[in-house]
């Protein structure tokens, strides 16, 4: 998700009296109410064209369950620990049966042996391995330490409450383990355009995000041919279907997208994926990338 050599750009926050918000230089209004009505869910969406600073926003200051979209930020926090000599990418951690929870495509095969911190990070980001994420949080000192990292990153609104898999319960009106879509834009921008991580670590994280095979019918489904997609999906109860991404064209500046859809429990997975894809398609068109 890191773009080497790009300059930092401002992301101005603002109050949101209604689900629709458009900056003065954005052009067309951006409406997603029909997508919500179609399935009865609630959609939070924010996109930023880095080159022009134009944005499109929908419910961008409302809370949504983040589910596994936190995992790139966990990797960033771990990389920072490595850069402070508090951790080593090559340190081996023993994987036990007690670590196992649902969705363990990498760690389940490693029970009884070790994985390095680097391998745990890759499993967390690339294939969303839940035990790997919990182990990384444990190895940094536990959830209190993990929670305390977010304000140092410039985020005082994301609520970190539980570990995997409990953070995916996504109950209506539950503020635990939630974020604001517009804050996610700021967080991705901070990862992509600040000097918090070394170029080597930037490249590792970007590679894992691009290689991730999850969510092919979400943001990936509507990106123009030739664009790279560095992204992380998240899914949970109550029909929660998320995807966050840095979309980079062959030429020109990237577009950051944060999409959170919840409350459409009766809709099929394909239908929920299609909502994320259609919202992204409309955003790209509104930002001049159709």
Image (tube, rainbow, N blue to C red):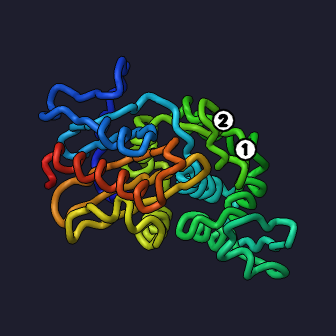
Residue neighbourhood size for the residue with mark 1, other residues' Cα within 10 Å, grouped as few (<14), some (14–19), many (≥20): some
- Quarter of the N terminus within the rendering: bottom left
93 displayed left or right of 46: right
Which residue is at the front of the view, 48 or 237? Answer: 237
Label 2 residue SS: loop
Do we see residue 51 in this rendering?
Answer: yes
Which residue is at the front of the view, 13 or 196? Answer: 13
State the image coordinates of residue 269 (x, y, percent, origin top left). Answer: 48, 60
State the image coordinates of residue 70 (x, y, percent, origin top left). Answer: 56, 50
Q: Are marks 1 and 2 in contact (CB under 8 Å)?
A: yes
Q: Which residue corresponds to the image point at 30% horizontal and 28% vertical from the top-left?
A: 20
Label 1 residue SS: loop
Q: Which residue corresponds to the image point at 33% horizontal and 43% vertical from the top-left?
A: 35
Kindly indicate the quadrant of the structure image that contains residue 152: top right
Do we see residue 1 in this rendering?
Answer: no
Residue neighbourhood size for the residue with mark 2, other residues' Cα within 10 Å, grouped as few (<14), some (14–19), many (≥20): many
Find disc 2 in the rendering and name its residue.
176
Instruction: Check the image and report above or below for 202 versus 285.
Output: below
Find disc 1 in the rendering and name its residue.
162
State the image coordinates of residue 5 (x, y, percent, origin top left). Answer: 30, 56
Total tally of numbered discs in the picture:
2
- Quarter of the C terminus within the rendering: bottom left
Gap between marks 1 and 2, in whole Å?
A: 8 Å
State the image coordinates of residue 161 (x, y, percent, origin top left). Answer: 70, 39
Kindly indicate the quadrant of the structure image that contains residue 121: bottom right
Q: Which residue corresponds to the image point at 30% horizontal and 67% vertical from the top-left?
A: 228
């Amino acid at each position: 998700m890191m773009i080497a050599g790009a300059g930092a750009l401002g992301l101005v926050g603002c109050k949101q009296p209604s689900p629709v918000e458009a900056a003065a230089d954005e052009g067309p209004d951006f409406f997603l109410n029909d997508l919500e009505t179609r399935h009865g869910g609630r959609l939070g969406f924010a996109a930023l064209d880095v080159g022009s600073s134009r944005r499109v926003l929908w419910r961008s200051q409302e809370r949504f369950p983040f589910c596994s979209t936190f995992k790139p930020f966990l990797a960033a926090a771990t990389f920072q620990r490595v850069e402070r000599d508090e951790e080593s990418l090559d340190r081996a951690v023993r994987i036990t049966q007690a670590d196992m929870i649902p969705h363990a495509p990498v760690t389940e095969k490693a029970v009884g042996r070790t994985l390095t911190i680097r391998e745990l990070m890759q499993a967390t980001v690339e294939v969303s391995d839940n035990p790997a994420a919990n182990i990384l949080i444990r190895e940094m000192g536990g959830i209190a330490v993990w929670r305390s990292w977010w304000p140092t990153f410039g985020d005082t609104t994301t609520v970190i409450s539980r570990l995997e898999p409990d953070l995916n319960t996504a109950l209506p009106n539950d503020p635990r383990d939630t974020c604001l879509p517009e804050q996610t834009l700021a967080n991705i921008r901070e990862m992509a355009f600040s000097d918090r991580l070394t170029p080597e670590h930037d490249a590792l994280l970007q590679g894992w995000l691009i290689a991730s095979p999850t969510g092919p019918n979400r943001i990936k489904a509507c990106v123009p041919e030739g664009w790279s997609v560095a992204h992380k999906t998240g899914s949970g109860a109550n029909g929660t279907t998320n995807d966050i991404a840095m979309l980079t064209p062959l030429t020109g500046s990237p577009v950051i997208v944060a999409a959170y859809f919840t409350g459409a429990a009766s809709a099929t997975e394909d239908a929920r994926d299609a909502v994320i894809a259609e919202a992204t398609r409309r955003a790209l068109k509104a930002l001049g990338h159709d």
